[in-house]
Image: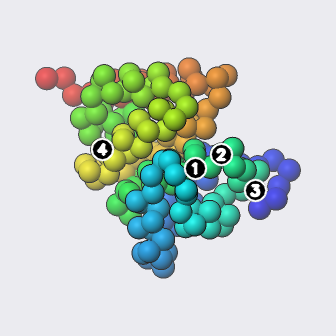
Amino acid sequence: MNSPESRGPSAHVPALARALADPHFSNGERAALKRMALDGPAPLALHRFILRQVDEAWQGEHWTARWRTLVCALAIQRDGGFDPTRPWGQALAEAGYAESRLERLLAAQGDALLAFALRAARQLAAKGLACDWRQLADLVFSGADSRERINTRIARDYYRNLKKD
């Protein structure tokens, strides 16, 4: 996994989703990843999962809270919940995710962003909607330089697919 140019977090998403959906993946580990909270000690299952699945350049403690959010979001989905043909913003619209919540999510920073992102993932899981989780990865791992571009893409996908009443 040591390469001069490491993959970004979003490039890990398809493999993470496949690993979590694999019938040979431990049910106990999957349950621990589903139940983990965003605060407090991370379960050992998260550390094992990150060490096995994530490029070394992205394994630092600095990234743990973001991986915690992304891995939990994927773990709560049915069968990994990854569908590269359905953008994350589109799935939010199809799930009836409130516009006011989307606004708070896209404006949030730090721990609030992670909490809002996980709530959105829980709503998608409740609706059974698979989507392209790479957009969530882009959002939670974004820096100030790319955040507006990512927000715009998510918002456009949301509004293109918002059902008008």
* Contact between labelled residues 2 and 1, with CB atoms less than 8 Å apart: yes
Query: Looking at the image, is mark 3 or mark 1 earlier in the sequence?
Result: 3
> Where does the image place residue 7, in percent across and percent down from the top left?
71, 48
User: Which quarter of the rendering shows the N terminus?
Assistant: bottom right
* Contact between labelled residues 4 and 1, with CB atoms less than 8 Å apart: no
Q: Which residue is mark 3?
A: 56
Q: Which residue is mark 4?
A: 123
Query: Looking at the image, is mark 2 or mark 3 earlier in the sequence?
Result: 3
Structural crowding at the residue carrying mark 4, measured as other residues with C-alpha within 10 Å and reported as few (<14), some (14–19) or many (≥20): some
Quadrant in the picture for residue 102: top left
Nearest-to-viewer mark from 4 and 2: 2
Q: Which residue is mark 1?
A: 67
Identify the residue at the far right of this view: 4
Calculate the distance from the C-alpha at mark 4 to the C-alpha at mark 2. 24 Å
Task: Assign a secondary structure to mark 1.
Answer: helix
Structural crowding at the residue carrying mark 2, measured as other residues with C-alpha within 10 Å and reported as few (<14), some (14–19) or many (≥20): some
Calculate the distance from the C-alpha at mark 1 to the C-alpha at mark 2. 6 Å
Identify the residue at the far bottom of this view: 24
- The amino acid type found where label 1 is placed reads Trp
Structural crowding at the residue carrying mark 1, measured as other residues with C-alpha within 10 Å and reported as few (<14), some (14–19) or many (≥20): many
| Residue 134 relative to residue 144: left or right | left
**Residue 21 seen in render:** no
Instruction: Please give the name of the residue rendered at 47% of the width and 61% of the height, measured from the top-left corner.
Output: 33
Query: Looking at the image, is mark 4 or mark 2 earlier in the sequence?
Result: 2
Find residue 63 and name its label.
2
In the image, residue 164 above or below residue 115? above
Instruction: Please give the name of the residue rendered at 36% of the width and 51% of the height, measured from the top-left corner.
Output: 130
| Residue 47 relative to residue 74: left or right | right
- The amino acid type found where label 3 is placed reads Glu
- The amino acid type found where label 2 is placed reads Trp
